[in-house]
């Protein structure tokens, strides 16, 4: 199923897209102050481990111009017990440098969140700029925390059901090894 915005289409990645996605992610994060330099490696690690729940590309006139990844997160409540299933982390999201600030990332995020909602996901978390992610409905919440991160930069979006509380852990592909 393709979703589109004008001439741009949002679709799941294919095996043929993988090298283009890696190069696009590296270019998009090159020199970014918040970048770890591992963003392409994280996506490849998620893919290898089967932890890439949703991987969408934005395609415009046959060229891949953006990518977004969603992967499962765990939420540990009181005493370390699992607090929720069906929660995902958004990121990384990358847009080809010459297409940034043109709505590609916004379209990818909207398309991804819609697909998660349609698949029965309960919620999504993101680590990022509050001014940007609030437009999608994300908000900081003291009930969810990510170790070592200022709480105003870690946000959640409830898609269905109650909000869990606890410590959020991303897939091991995000860890430095």
Image (spheres, rainbow, N blue to C red):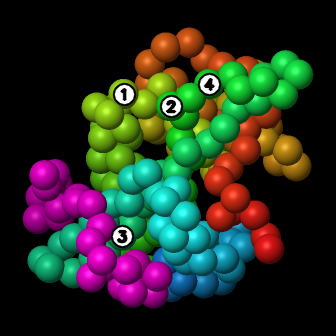
Q: Secondary structure at mark 3?
A: strand
Dot 3 crowding, Cα within 10 Å, few <14, some 14–19, many 20+: many
The numbered dot on residue 120 is 1
Dot 2 crowding, Cα within 10 Å, few <14, some 14–19, many 20+: some
The residue that label 4 is drawn on is 84
Q: Earlier in the sequence, mark 4 or mark 3?
A: 3
Q: From the viewer's perspective, is residue 14 above or below residue 139? A: below
Q: Residue at x 38, y 60 (%)?
A: 55
Residue 8 lies in the magenta-colored region: yes
Dot 4 crowding, Cα within 10 Å, few <14, some 14–19, many 20+: some
**Which label sits in the foreground, 3 or 2?**
2
Find the distance from the CA under tag 1 to the CA under tag 3.
Answer: 25 Å
The residue that label 2 is drawn on is 86
Find residue 1 and report its horizontal and vertical position in percent: 13, 52
The residue that label 3 is drawn on is 66
Q: Earlier in the sequence, mark 1 or mark 2?
A: 2
Residues shaded magenta? 1-24
Q: Are marks 4 and 1 in contact (CB under 8 Å)?
A: no
Q: Secondary structure at mark 4?
A: strand
Residue 3 left/right relative to 17? left
**In which image quadrant can residue 8 be found?**
bottom left
Quadrant showing the C terminus: bottom right
Residue 91 left/right relative to 146? left
Q: Residue at x 48, y 26 (%)?
A: 122
**Which label sits in the foreground, 4 or 3?**
4
Residue 173 lies in the magenta-colored region: no
Q: Are marks 1 and 2 in contact (CB under 8 Å)?
A: yes
């Amino acid at each position: 199923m393709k979703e589109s915005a004008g001439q741009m289409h949002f679709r799941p990645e294919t095996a043929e897209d993988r090298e283009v996605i890696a190069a696009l992610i590296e270019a998009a994060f090159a020199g970014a102050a918040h970048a770890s330099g591992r963003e392409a490696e994280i996506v490849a690690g998620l893919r290898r481990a089967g932890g890439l729940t949703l991987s969408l590309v934005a395609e415009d006139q046959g060229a891949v111009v953006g990518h977004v990844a969603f992967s499962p997160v765990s939420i540990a409540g009181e005493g370390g017990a699992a607090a929720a299933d069906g929660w995902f982390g958004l990121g990384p999201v990358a847009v080809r440098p010459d297409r940034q600030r043109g709505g590609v990332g916004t379209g990818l995020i909207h398309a991804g969140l819609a697909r998660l909602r349609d698949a029965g996901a309960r919620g999504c978390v993101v680590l990022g700029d509050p001014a940007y992610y609030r437009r999608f409905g994300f908000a900081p919440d003291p009930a969810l925390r990510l170790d070592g991160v200022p709480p105003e930069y870690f946000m959640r979006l409830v898609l269905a059901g109650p909000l869990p509380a606890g410590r959020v852990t991303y897939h091991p592909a995000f860890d430095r090894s």
